[in-house]
Image: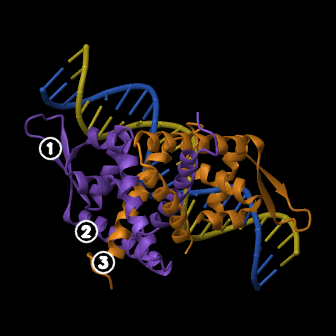
Chain colours: A orange, B purple, C yellow, D blue
Amino acid sequence: MTSPEDPLQRTATDLRFAAFRLARRLRSVRAVDAMSDAQLAVLAALRMHGRHSITALAERERVTAPSMSTMLTGLEEQGYVVRIPDPDDRRRVHVEITEVGADVVAETIRRRDELMAAKISAAELTPHELEVLREASALMRRVAEL
Amino acid sequence: MTSPEDPLQRTATDLRFAAFRLARRLRSVRAVDAMSDAQLAVLAALRMHGRHSITALAERERVTAPSMSTMLTGLEEQGYVVRIPDPDDRRRVHVEITEVGADVVAETIRRRDELMAAKISAAELTPHELEVLREASALMRRVAEL
DNA sequence: TATTGTTATACTCTATAACTATA
DNA sequence: TATAGTTATAGAGTATAACAATA
């Protein structure tokens, strides 16, 4: 067990709070107003990791296959993804992001990075503080993957 | 404008990505399975900032008043909040978190901190790296508030 | 008239259960 | 039989429009 005074536990609490705050603030920035977080997360996964079967995509996003299926129908109707039948296994479907879909993700990321950069700039950090944030980013990714 | 090689812009991108990753991973931890992120956010706001009018709470959570009203009805039925009529202005209602509601928030935070601490521990960080995360947490909060 | 909150209605995201098609 | 995906149905959270009560 860890006590509240344990530096590790204190760091955990601080980091949990800070990451939530920052993520929440950034999440409100979108390229397309009508796009939900759930839809954006699916597009981002497809853009980063390439085509997925419905089942694989559902597992990655931690939703059920029927939920993913209906969400994909919506994304497909809006032209952000395409369903591609698998020629070797006719039960399967590959889902791929379209150019338009990828553009929406790229533009959203661009706007979020822009906001993030504006905030960091406004904070007038010292070179040391900037370096701390850089190092911490890498550590946070490492910690999150465990 | 900033270029992609700009250290500030690079830090912004790294930090945006890391904060999202970490927050997403933590968000999946709950004290009560049936509780949604939206409900938890409302309870956390009430616990941290005290009683709110419906309008004020809707603004804080960036949803419309009707959305907040229906969500509160659900939370009230589950015993997590109470509506208290304002004696001086009979249009207004104050929303307050109950002890049960506060316990749910506290337990959720406890579990998330526990997970966070376990991950940091598993990462076997050096004292320097731990200190970097601590400093960065404070900087991130400062940046997020701007 | 303006403000505070609710009700009516509709759409999306989520789930579970039941189904179809294919392996 | 098992697997991949869809359809049917229901509940929660979101919105806008229309409304009631009060200031």
The answer to whether B99 appears left or right of A129 in the picture is left
For marks 1 and 2 on the same chain, the one whose residue lies earlier in the sequence: 1
Confirm or deny contact between disc 3 and disc 1 (CB under 8 A). Answer: no
Q: Give the quarter of the image for residue A128.
A: bottom left
- Label 3 in the same subunit as label 2: no
Decide which of B132, A65 is in the foreground and name it: B132
Q: Label 3, on which residue?
A: A6
* The N terminus of chain A: image quadrant: bottom left
Residue designated by label 2: B103
Element marked by disc 2: helix
Measuring 65% from the left and 45% from the top, which residue is drawn there?
A105
B36 over A110 or under it: above or below = below
**Label 2: chain?**
B
The image position of residue C21, as x and y in percent, is 85, 64
Cα–Cα gap, marks 3 and 1: 43 Å
Q: Residue furthest left?
A: B88
Q: Position of residue A13 (x, y in %)?
A: 35, 67
Where is mark 1, residue-wise? B85
- Please provide percent x and percent y for residue B144: 40, 48
Residue at (67% x, 51% y) in the render: A43
Identify the chain of the residue marked 1, using the numbered disc in the image. B
* Residue B123 appears left or right of A102: left
